[in-house]
Image: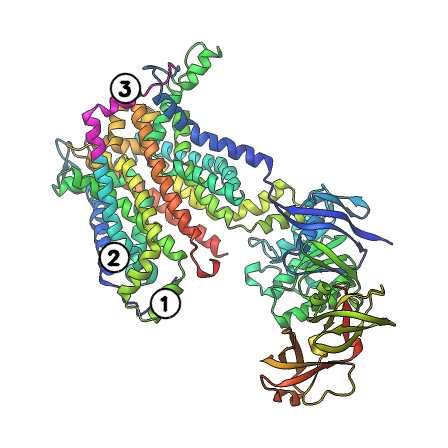
Amino acid sequence: MNATVVLEHVTKAHGQMVAVNDVSLSMKSGEFFSILGPSGSGKTTILRMIAGLDVPDSGTIMIQQRVVNADPPHVRPVNMVFQHYALFPHMNVFDNIAFGLRMRPEAGRNIRQAVERMVALVRLDGKSQRFPGQLSGGEQQRVALARALVNRPVVVLLDEPLAALDQQLRQEMQGELKRLQQEVNATFICVTHQQDEALTLSDRIAVMHAGTLLQVGTPQEVYDQPASSTVARFIGLSNSLSGTMTRLENNVCWIEHEAFPTLMARYPSGAAAHGPVTVMVRPERLHISLDVPDKGYDNTLPAVVHHIMFHGNEMAYQFRLRNEAVWTARVPIGETRRAQLAIGQAVYLQWAVHEGLALVP
Amino acid sequence: MRHYSSHVFPLPVSFSFWAAGLFLCLFFLLPLGVVLGVSLASRGLYGGVQWIGTFENYRRLADPMIGVIFVRSILFASLTTLVCAVVGFPLAYMVARASQRWQLVWLTLVMIPFWTNFLVRTYAWVLILRADGLVNSLLLQLGIESEPLPLLFTDLAVGVGLVYGYLPFMVLPLIVAIERIPPQLEEAAYDLYASVGAMFRHVVLPLSKPGFWAGGVLVFIPSLGAFITPYLLGGGQKMMIGTLIQQEFLVSRDWPFGSALSFGLMGTALVLWFVVSRTSLGKDVQ
Amino acid sequence: MRRLPGPIILSGGLVMVFLYFPILVLMGLSLNASTMGVAWKGFSLQWYAKLLGNPAMIEAAVNSLIIAFTSTSLSLLLGIGTAIRLEQQQSRHTSWMMAIIVLPLVIPEILLGVALLMLFVLCQIPLGFGSMIIGHMVFNLPLTVVILRARLRKMDPAWEEAARDLGATPWKVLTCITLPMLRPAIWGAALLSFTVSLDDFVVTFFVAGPGATTLPLKVFSMIKTGITPEVNALSAILVVVSMCCVGLSWIVHQRANAQSSTPSSS
């Protein structure tokens, strides 16, 4: 167990608002750790406290087994990639990257060499004399990364690193980030509100909401066994229906609802609890049957087509259930048979038992 | 900038535009032309102007006595600008980075002297510095000095008065410039191991340059032509260009020479204005 | 990180004290019963009473107000249209106007004074109210235009374009959209140019006629003849009046900002 960064019962309020509420976390050396949450969930505040830009009200922050609560940012072995990069507009790429080394006399004389190696590493060869204003968004992102990495920090903090990039560039940079992290072998702590980004990049994910930590685990764990309906919703389980659990067998539970036939879903939490539960299903896992329900599915819900949206590579359908709840289904455009759906049409939504998840609300 | 190629303006808009243009031509450009014309004419026997063309007035600018006054003025103006920049920066930074509510308070407090009567603000220093003024009374009462110090009518008094008078002209543009620097850049510098001093040296000060340029112009030009300050606090003994011009016009009544002086002053000011606006523009583009 | 470095706060605070100390000294002394020196001899309003009892002083005050009011109104009359045209159209005329309009604000004031003096004398225009009003307009007009233009610049052109798209004539756009939205800035500009005009000494000093005098001229001539507590009282009045005007225009400005300049931020 070699934790690089440890947070113990950290709390931080901005005026009246509690941004971070009693959060304990530990990031292992060399791992890619993501903090996932909607804006205002306190994830950026955690990052800033690790960087030393904010001071926790209570609790301790340790970096490499040393309490750093009161240390100013310039003595911490931590560097940050800011949300909008915060490149110095009056310095060229070279000077931006060299800044951290020049600020530390112990960094030695090989600044030019170190910077040039970094420029090559982030594939910006030939652009070191440019100014930030002359670079594209992706290039600025690379400079920001290089500027942090050149200092060989123990921990690299990334604040929504890909938010300012367009879709295509974002996917490219995801791979790039992973490659760089493996190359420099530092702990990366990344804050994001994009679940796919967190799931693809991370070794472990922490999900936050309204200042509290909801769940920590590997992407697989968070994806398969969300600890609560909030987490589930955050990782894409957007369709939900509340009912009462009546039976539990081998992690599969039976749920009753007054308006619908009995439903079956996975119940991973283990604890036997009979009572109110929420069933959640991903939009892309729903099967739509037109006239009669298909036999091959465990669960069937009657619904009416409410809204149809064309998304280029897929169709998104909104359905209204008998209890007025709205569910969404996503269908790849290739399955043309579904395109015949019309608003107002009655259909059956179906899914297999392992696609649904039951959670205690 | 909006650009409507086919924009139709209501008549009153066009009217006031052209009327304003005419007004400025008649009462701003024309008078400057008159200054130029008179500076090339000769002095009448009893004051006034005789329209005999001559460069004599400009030749007289080279007179060592006059040259000394020009050099003094430029020196005073440069020092004033420098001191205003040094003194004004901490205040400007404090205002620019204050929390929203405090910023409003500080900004109001900086704005008020900016628009308050210059003559009166200078006069207040007479009350503080003169022989039976505030400073001397205090010194005598505390027994530090037995005789009042000659504070008024000294170079120091003029310097203090100029800095005091024009400081807001430096602070306001600086506030604007500092506000434009994203606070994230400062955080990035701290994150990259900069100490507070290094952060200011490498990030805030270089990025405040447009503010220093603008403030510098706004302080340098009026202090170069200052008239009230050297008159009230310098006692009119050691002259600056402003006091000299005033004297030529209202005491010696040598209008042509006074005009040549004025033109020298304007030339100096305009050249500096253009040089500086070019430079600061160039910096902005970058 | 909201914390400011200690030395910055300390020196910034000291500079703030430096800005206000002389003004406070002046105000304090104007309330001092003592006729000579700075020693405190008790609170008294006698110097103010003496000013009010002086008909020459009242006349100077009235003159100051007339000149400030007239030059401000005329500057607004010409300045509003000029600012709108400068902001909404770029042409050879407007770029010339831009170059000329800022100059009176940046050249040394004494130059304006002597230039106007010679113009008036050589053209045999009598010095007096007229010359002083014109003199003040030379800096009030540019000031008005600069302030209004700054405001226009912050306004979203989409509002005017929306009005045009909805069928408003240029005249209707002006009276129903542009002017109402510009109103706070117009008040702000009016108050500021009124203050500047009320306070102006240098230009007034050169173009004043023998008949009419203004309060700042009065202050100057009183200082020359000898420092009396009455000068302090008069100066204090001038300071307070400018502070009120500036404060008022500042409030108007803040209100306008609070009302927001772009639809998206409201």
- Residue B62, magenta (yes or no): no
Range covered by the magenta-colored residues: C41-62
Q: Mostly what secondary structure, the magenta segment?
A: helix
Q: Residue furthest front?
A: A258
The residues tagged by marks 2 and 3 sit, at their Cα atoms, a distance apart of 47 Å
Tags 2 and 3 in contact by the CB under 8 Å rule?
no
Decide if residue B24 is on the left or right side of residue A244.
left
Decide if residue B183 is on the left or right side of residue C204.
right
Q: Which residue does the numbered mark 3 point to in the structure image?
A: C226
Decide if residue C136 is on the left or right side of residue C153.
left
Residue under the image location 29 percent in, 27 percent down: C234
Q: Position of residue B253 (x, y in %)?
A: 19, 31
Mark 1 closeness class: few <14, some 14–19, many ≥20 residues within 10 Å: few
Mark 2 belongs to which amino acid?
A: Phe
Q: Which chain's residue wears label 2?
A: B
Residue A229 appearing in the image: yes
Q: Earlier in the sequence, mark 1 or mark 3?
A: 1
Q: Which chain's residue wears label 3?
A: C
Q: In terms of depth relative to the viewer, which is nearer, A205 or A275?
A: A275
Q: Which residue does the numbered mark 1 point to in the structure image?
A: C161
Tag of residue B17? 2
Residue C227 appearing in the image: no
The residues tagged by marks 1 and 3 sit, at their Cα atoms, a distance apart of 61 Å
Which quarter of the picture shows residue B123? top left
Q: In terms of depth relative to the viewer, which is nearer, A334 or C84?
A: A334
- Residue C55, magenta (yes or no): yes
Residue A232 against residue B265 in the figure, above or below = below
Mark 3 closeness class: few <14, some 14–19, many ≥20 residues within 10 Å: few
